[in-house]
Image: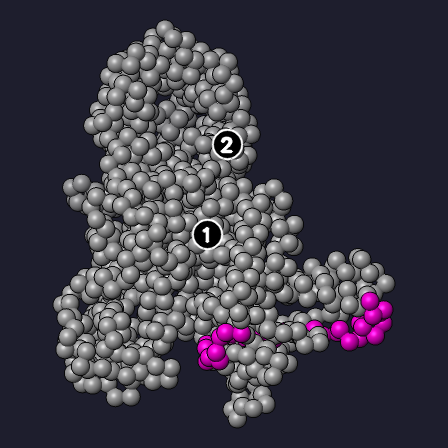
Amino acid sequence: MTPANKHTHSNARQRLEQVIAFLESSRPQLGDEAVDIALASLREKLAGLDTDRTSSHEPQQRKLVTILFADVSGFTAMAETMDHEIVSDVINSLWSRVDKAILDHGGRIDKHIGDAIMALFGTPTAHEDDPERAIRSALLIQSEIQDWKREQSEALSNYRSQIQNIQLRIGINTGPALLGTIGTIGEYTAIGDTVNLASRLEHAAPVGGILISNDTHQHVRGIFEVTALEPITVKGKSEPIQVFTVNGIRPRSFRDTTRGLEGIETRTIGRELELEQMKAAFEETIRQGATHLINLVAEAGIGKSRLLFEFGKWLDTQEQPIRLFKGRASQETSQIPYSLLRGILSSSFEIQENDRAAIAHQKLEQGIQQIASDKENALQYAHFIGHLIGFDYSTSPYLKGILSDARQIRDRAFHYASQIITDISRQQPVVIFLEDIHWADAGTLDFLDHLMNQRPDLPLMVIGLTRSTLFEYRPDWGKGSVQTLSLELLPLSEADTRLLVAEILQKVPNVPKSLTDLIVNKAEGSPFYVEELIKVLIESGVIVRGREQWSVELERLSNLKVPATLTGLLQARLDGLKADVRETLQQASVVGRIFWTDIVEHMHNPDLRSAEMTLPITDRFGVLRNKELIYRYEESASKQASEFIFKNQILHDVTYESVLLRLRPVYHVQAAVGLVEIGGERANEYAGRVGEHYERAGEWLKAAEWYARAGRQAQNTYASDSAIGFYQKALGFINGHGTDEHRPLKIDVLQRLGDVLNWQARYTEAMEVHGQMAETAQEADDSAARSRALQALATSVSYQGDHRAALEYALQAETLARTVDAKLELFRALYTQGWARFRLGEGTMALSLAQKALEVSTDLKDPNEMARCLNLLGAAYYASGQYDMVEKYWEEALKIFRELGNQQQGMDLLSNLGVVADARGDYETAFQRYDGALSIAREIGYRDGEIVFLTNRGGELVALNNHAAAEADLRQAIQMAGVTGSWCMPLTFNFRAEALIGLGKYDEAFYSARQALVLAEEDKTPEYIGMAWRTLGVICDRTDDMVRFSDWETHQMGEYNAEDCFGRSAKIFADADLEMERARTLRDWARHEFGRGGNKRATDMWREAQEIFEKIGAHMEVERMGELPE
């Protein structure tokens, strides 16, 4: 090519690249479809220029490439029935789609041969993921063919059947090929055995399928869903070759890169025993259908990730389909609630960090709807889970009525997510890989604990890679009902280290002993040190890589100073980078171990001119990837990945420490700005990270603002510890650097911080914080805020049982609210006063205050607050025994809570209404209400409530004389409580004793009643102690015997007859003013006396019980007693 031609070629290429860049930037205006159509032809022209240039100037070379062959099936039969012109148009429209799919994935069209096509991946520019690109393009081609068939069938309806018969077979192979200008016409192409095998695979592929070789599969293991076929015999190969069909893209979190060095995959060394233990645990998971947790524990660089990789390879060989989820925690996200869980779901459903909120929501919802068995409720599941992991679902119809109830949202999200895992595990085993869980956020670990211990009966395996520090702050991790295997990995032995060196240097014919000794002695059993030292030796020219063999230049070794520590070794590798490449890696380290390229691209060193950056940034990332310092992290099927990860945390830390101190604040500000830009409308999801960057930059008030946002995010998902940490940081920066204009932010932070401290029962601290809020509000002359502060103080003292102090604070809050006509603050003050009066026994005042609060909440048009007032009104009437009014108000409140979707409050109210029905003696209605509450508890996964409602329902079944059903309910409640217990167990055991009495099983009844008494005495609960003694009295009556057991406190053996037991029960209830239960004891005691012939005493007791029932409004009990028993 002459200089003039070079100039023309350069200008043509530049013009094409400019037009392509312009079209890419015009997508918002022109639309994706129009731009894609225009780009297809331009990219083909650009590829043509590359071909011209390569064919003229590039010498023949041998390179690793991936070859794709595709052949159209059914084309000949279709062509025979069509006009030639139509055939030409149809096939051209088909090839335009195929070509575009190849070009969009970085492939190069080598040639069209009739109804077949050959494409190259890896030339002229090689990428580490060329095999993956080839398979992704193949999958897209098969998808595009289906779209093409639909379009052509509509346009050429007369040929619909022929068009529908069109299919493509695709074969893909990876290996070395000779590239260059071949033949007399100077055509640039690839030749060799790799090309021939790809062609053979295309012929062997199923119609409509994709067939890949084992060599290609080695490069993409873990990325795609594949099926291993029986080895096939192909022309030109003496032995059958292993092949795989590609079925789709596997959901994943991080890439299964080939383990080893410089593309050499090494076998497992020194971890064979641990690998066998992991395999055995998995087989046990399948056989038992029991949840297993495996902890791989080791410090950095010892080989946790390699062992997990080997286990993953073994899983791939299992015939049984497995659903695999993957996630990795990072130091940067350790304080962001549910960040690890969000990462798992985002990767599974291909949610990009820079997706718009609507797109992120759509992907999450579609993903969950696809995997959930309960299709009817899958959308609700998605909204709760999405809100938990930080997506904003505040406008969801499922959540908007309960946004103030963060705990309910958290609990229901946990239940729904667990239910999805349960659904999947019923179809296939579920395996979850988790890396670096010593940095996992507390919320995700809480969820995993919930999942494993609530459902220990699933074919579920969780594998966590961690350092020992996890157990310092999470000592109970892996304890409970889940079966746990902890494997502590030790440094490799000297013998195993020598084997590892030999394995990595397998291309060196005879590795000098002195070189092996140097590596082994320096490594001290660290596989990571071995790899890094060998890389230093390669980069220093001591080890020289060749195409087939490597060699060693020992004379260079004497001049090389090998650092004694891993940190020094890594620093030496950084020092060996070109300045601009090192600068880019340092900037990436400021973003975090996991970083986005589009953030780093906008970071710059103010001390350097752009001209000093000699390489384009994409090439700098390419250098870093080729040197295996960074890897591509998370990808989707439809987007070019822009997320990378440092090879490990040690490398990241060493790189960050190499950043000049004066540059760190500059870079941290740039990283913060970049995170906000990439987050867009979802920026609050990164609020904690943005705050940390501003903190490290010394931008204290910006840090305070973002930490306050992060605190709200955590509070909204009931991540209390994280919320407190963020709020305390924000408060510290405001106190240290804020001015008067920051008082509103300070007031808001103080209020929220105090509220969360109250959640944790840290009442003294909460009062100190809310006291500061009151002072700040007074300084700001903000009466509404002062009212809220006093109201918050009332809440704290009320939680501590000081209802008189709560009343005083609420009265002051009311006065302030009225001075500025603050309606919401007035409502809260009146409402708090109402509950304080109720708990102080001032029922009339409580009723009056509840009515006033209801009027204010009605004016505010706040249905949630209206329902709370109705609940208070019902409670006030319950205290006075006016059950009709109780039911009226609680039924109204129940209706509102149901409309709001507040199932937790609705469930509690149904249970309370059951208590009312029981108090009236209406056992059937009580049973129905408890049954309704139980159904809700099961629906939302409220296990504690399920135990309570099973107990209450069982009690009503006893009253209805359905003793067998009652005993089954109560036994289930006891089994559910297990070793952790429940506050209602005294009642549960007592009801079960009553059911067993009804079944005539008196020995078992005695054991259950005795257990009820022991638990009640431990809790010092008079109501339950009295009930247990009453049941023991009934046992004595039925068996005509005494009961004998040791006293709970004195441990002295005692004997008690029926009269002793009934007498104790009646006295306890009288002392505690529990008239309903006293009446029930008197009734049972009277029956005993009638049986013994003591009619006068029995009659007096019977009449007294009737009078009590009549007095408290239990009219159905009065009717049920009727006349004296015969």
Q: How is the image coloured?
A: one colour
**In this view of the protein, which residue sits in the foreground, 608 or 721?**
608
From this view, report whether residue 185 is shown above or below residue 92. below
Q: Residue at x 36, y 6 (%)?
A: 819
Above/below status of 1031 relative to 123: above
Please, is residue 289 above or below residue 332 in the view?
A: below
Left or right position of 221 against 72: left
The total number of labels drawn is 2
Q: Residue 400 got which mark?
A: 2
Q: Position of residue 972 (x, y in %)?
A: 43, 50
Q: Amino acid at mark 2?
A: Lys
- Residue 1008: x percent and y percent? 34, 47
**What number is the disc on residue 337?**
none
Measure how far apart labels 1 and 2 are at the Cα level: 23 Å
Q: Which residues are magenta?
A: 56-85
Q: Is residue 419 magenta?
A: no
Residue 69 falls within the magenta-colored stretch: yes
Q: Is residue 330 above or below residue 274?
A: above
Residue that numbered label 1 is attached to: 345
Residue 467 in sight here: no
Name the kind of residue labelled 1 in the image. Leu
- On the image, the x and y values in percent for residue 26 come to 58, 45
